[in-house]
Each structure stands twice: as C-alpha cells, then as structure tokens.
Amino acid sequence: MSPSRFDKLGPSLQIQLSDWFQRHLGRLLAEQEQRHLEKWVAGLFGYYLIQVGLPVPDLELLRGSPVKNKILLDSRLEGVDLRANPLQIPLATDSVDAVLMHHALDFSSDPHQLLREVERILIPEGKLLIVGFNPMSLWGIWRLFHLRGTQTPWAGHFFSVKRVSDWLSLLGFDLQAVEYLNFRPPLQNQAIMQRLTFIERLGEKNWPVLGGVYVLVAVKRTLTMTPIKPKWAIRKKVLPAAVEPTTRTLNQ
C-alpha cells in the first residue's frame, strides 16, 4: 500500500498528540472523555483490559474498571505497559476481555487492520469501546480548514459513527450504544471556553448527535454463518490507496 499522509508524519505524530492533549483544549477534552467513560469502564469485567491509542498524561482512562490487568499499548510513547505496533498486537487470539480505543482509529495509518487486530484478540462477548472525533460537529467544521496540513488533531481521519458501525458489523460486532460529548467549538482561549459551558447542556438536550467526540460501545459476537468479504470504504482524501487484504480478511 502506498504511504499515506499519516505515515509521512513519522514518529513525531504521537509526540504531537501528547503535546496537544497537555494544552488547554486537549486537557479539557480529555477530562470530559474520562468523566464520560467512567460508567462504561466501571462495567468492564474479566482478566485483561487494554487501551489502544494515545495515553493522556496524568489521566487514567481505565482507572474505574475492576479488571485486574490493565495494559496501555502504544508503539512509540515511553511509559506504556506494552510498546508494540497496534496493527500487529503481540497477544494471543481470543485472549482479551475488553479494549478501549482512544482516538486510535482517528490516527491509524491502516484503520481496517487495526479493527481486525482488535477483533482477533477480543474474546467472544468481549467489549469494545471506541472514542473518536465526530466529523458531523463543530470540530468537523474546524477540520475542513486544516485538511491540507499535518497539525494535530486535525490531521486525523474523523470517521463517522455510521461508517465505523458498518465496519464493526462486518467483523461480527453488535452495536450496544453511542453517546456524544463536547458541543463547544474547539477554541484554545480558556476564558471563552468557560463562558460557553452552557452549550454543553444545550447540545446534550437538543442536538446530541453533533457532539465533537463520540463514544461507541460494541460487543464481539461469535459468527455462526459463512461471512462475506468486508467492503471497506474510505474517502480518497484520507487514504488514497486501497487497503490490501490480510489473513484476517473474510473470504467470499
């Protein structure tokens, strides 16, 4: 597959994201995400829970889960529990009880392969939580003005919930819930953002699907029928080349 603009960012991508999450806007978003995830993470049980994607400094998104073994996985950042390529996770098939993907799809060079790997390591009835940027939001509008750049977080994919849900369905997942948060425009000015707090309440009540970030919860089901080959779809602006099939691709 030809290099994408995500590959061209190189090793600096994770550092850029980490730096962004430590600035005011990123920190505000991370704190909202943690509060929103608490109820879902608290309901995750089993022996192994993995977070795939950007670990936010000083914030523990998995802390409320009763799961004994919590693992942070990342390919480049220091201080994680497992340094590995998320596209080739060095864990056994059907060995993980739950996975939290924290903006992992947004910044993956091969989101299809990433989903296949997560599906592979999850046990049947395992839970998958996906946190991602919503293109149908003020954040999505802001991104339109940064499409030609490599500045984070605007260099990400911003996949729609419908698209991600379709991909998960092809892999045998059942959608359990979708929730949205962060309805304010993505402004770095702390004083203005504080004055716009009321928009959060209005958004949750009147236009919930327009939140800047979504939390999608899905369950891996055991397939009992012969599946067909997934028909992935990504706009050429994001990944111009087609994704090559792997051994995890379902046959027709």
Image (cartoon, rainbow, N blue to C red):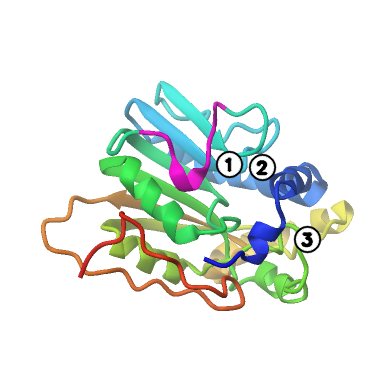
Instruction: Return the x and y of residue 177 as percentages of the image width and height.
Output: 38, 56
Q: Which one is nearer the viewer's eye here, 181 or 131?
A: 131
For mark 1, give the secondary structure: helix
Residue appearing at x 74%, y 71% in the figure = 142
Snapshot quadrant of residue 4: bottom right
Mark 3: few, some, or many residues within 10 Å (few <14, many ≥20)? some
**Along the horizontal axis of the image, is 46 left or right of 27?**
left
* CB-based contact (under 8 Å), mark 1 and mark 2: yes
Q: Position of residue 104 (x, y in %)?
A: 55, 51
Label 3 or label 1, whichever comes before in sequence order: 1
- Label 2 belongs to which residue? 31
The reply to whether the magenta stretch includes residue 205 is: no
Q: Real-space Cα distance between discs 3 and 1?
A: 26 Å
Q: Position of residue 35 (x, y in %)?
A: 58, 41
Which residue is tagged 3? Answer: 151
Is label 3 in a helix, a strand or a loop? Answer: loop
Q: From the image, which quarter does the C terminus lie in?
A: bottom left
Q: Secondary structure at mark 2?
A: helix
**Marks 2 and 3, how far apart at CA:** 22 Å
Task: Report the front residue among 251 and 94.
Answer: 251
Residue at (67% x, 65% y) in the render = 5
User: In front: mark 2 or mark 3?
Assistant: 3
Residue 79 at what x, y percent from top left?
65, 26
First in sequence: mark 2 vs mark 3 = 2
